[in-house]
């Protein structure tokens, strides 16, 4: 492609210009260029082709020149650009036309010939410049848009990493606290808990892909639930149901845990927890319910009726970043129970 623009385009440019020039000139003078001396035509054609190698570079030169100006987007600067190019083009056209007449023994050159050459060459160069200038604006717009998208994406990735950095210490504190109390009662069981805890950490540290199969997320939740059961009272009534159809669907990791963790943290009253994950037509319905004392209102746990705490605050923000317009997250207090439900569109 570079070979075409460098070696083939200028001759074609010159031939097209010469053809139009001869047609316009012959129409005004009623001459026929094929009846002229072939030497004169050969000189004019050769001159147009040679000059075109320099002319085709003029628009690109001025585009690069004007792009360096700080005020290049102002209207008067655009007129100044076209005026400067037109002036240089007219000087070149006048000089080349005069030289061509001298070489072809057709001197002196007529005013009508100068007008035709200057007008046609000026239109050619200005049209060529406008095309290149417009293309440069489009390329600049696309580059700026891509850069803006990259900056936005980098900002979102940074925010996601920050949210995960906030979340991990919160989880570590709860898990280590569980193992700490377990070691006073049964060292063997504490070792098993440490093993499950290491598996949880391995999922967080080494399996953080862009998305993961939901089966991995469910396995992670099962380990977490078993770890929490160790520290919970024996009177806890726990009901867990994961739809068997949830297997290979892709999901962003660590989105479901905050709801489960929140239920274990605030369970009270009749002391029961129900966890359910179902596959629906549009995606996943994940529901967590836990008993709370009837006298506790949602405002006591979440000021102003909005989910609070590191876990659920981060969950809301991650959902906004990862599933914009593709999720529904709601919490609700009903009598003696608290309900948290998340709908994700795969």
Image: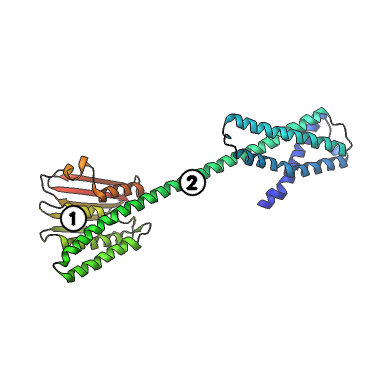
| Near-viewer residue (303 or 115) | 303
Residue 279 lies in quadrant: bottom left
> Which residue is identified by label 1?
264
> Which residue is identified by label 2?
147
Who's the residue at 67% across and 31% down the image? 83
Circle 1: element type:
helix
* Label 2 – label 1 distance at C-alpha: 44 Å
**Could you tell me residue 116's position as x and y percent?**
77, 31
Residue 147, compared with residue 185, is above or below; it is: above
**Could you tell me residue 139's position as x and y percent?**
56, 43
Q: Residues within 10 Å of mark 1 (few under 14, many from 20)?
A: many
**Could you tell me residue 131's position as x and y percent?**
63, 39
Circle 2: element type:
helix
Residue 115 lies in quadrant: top right
Which circle's residue, 2 or 1, is located before the other in the chain?
2
Residue 77, compared with residue 251, is above or below; it is: above
| Near-viewer residue (80 or 39) | 80
| Near-viewer residue (188 or 227) | 188
Who's the residue at 87% across and 31% down the image? 108
Side of 314 relative to 135 (left or right): left
Q: Determine the residue located farthest toward the bottom in the rendered image.
A: 188
Who's the residue at 73% across and 35% down the image? 89
Side of 23 relative to 258 (left or right): right
């Amino acid at each position: 492609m570079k070979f075409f623009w460098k070696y083939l385009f200028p001759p074609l440019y010159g031939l097209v210009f010469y053809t139009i020039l001869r047609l316009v000139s012959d129409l005004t003078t009623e001459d026929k260029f094929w009846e002229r001396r072939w030497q004169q035509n050969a000189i004019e054609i050769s001159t147009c082709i040679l000059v075109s190698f320099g002319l085709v570079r003029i628009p690109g030169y001025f585009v690069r020149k004007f792009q360096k100006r700080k005020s290049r987007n102002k209207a008067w600067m655009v007129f100044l650009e076209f005026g400067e190019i037109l002036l240089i083009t007219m000087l070149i056209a006048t000089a080349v036309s005069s030289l061509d007449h001298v070489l072809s023994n057709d001197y002196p050159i007529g005013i009508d010939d100068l007008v035709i050459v200057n007008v046609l060459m000026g239109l050619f160069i200005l049209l060529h410049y406008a095309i290149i200038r417009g293309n440069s604006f489009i390329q600049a717009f696309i580059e700026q848009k891509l850069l803006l998208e990259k900056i936005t994406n980098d900002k979102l990735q940074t925010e996601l990493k920050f949210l995960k950095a906030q979340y991990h210490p919160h989880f570590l504190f709860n898990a280590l606290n569980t193992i700490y109390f377990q070691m006073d009662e049964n060292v063997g069981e504490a070792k098993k808990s440490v093993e499950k805890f290491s598996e949880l950490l391995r999922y967080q540290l080494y399996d953080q892909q862009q998305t993961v199969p939901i089966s991995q997320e469910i396995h992670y939740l099962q380990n977490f639930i078993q770890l929490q059961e160790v520290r919970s009272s024996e009177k806890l009534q726990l009901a867990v149901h994961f739809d068997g159809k949830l297997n290979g669907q892709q999901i962003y990791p660590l989105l479901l845990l905050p709801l489960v963790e929140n239920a274990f943290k605030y369970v009270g009253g009749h002391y029961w927890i129900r966890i359910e994950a179902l596959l629906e037509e549009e995606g996943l319905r994940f529901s967590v319910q836990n008993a709370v004392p009837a006298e506790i209102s949602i405002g006591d746990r979440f000021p102003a009726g909005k989910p609070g705490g590191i876990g659920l605050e981060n969950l809301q923000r991650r959902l906004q970043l990862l599933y914009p317009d593709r999720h529904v997250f709601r919490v609700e207090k009903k009598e003696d129970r608290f309900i948290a439900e998340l709908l994700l569109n795969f």
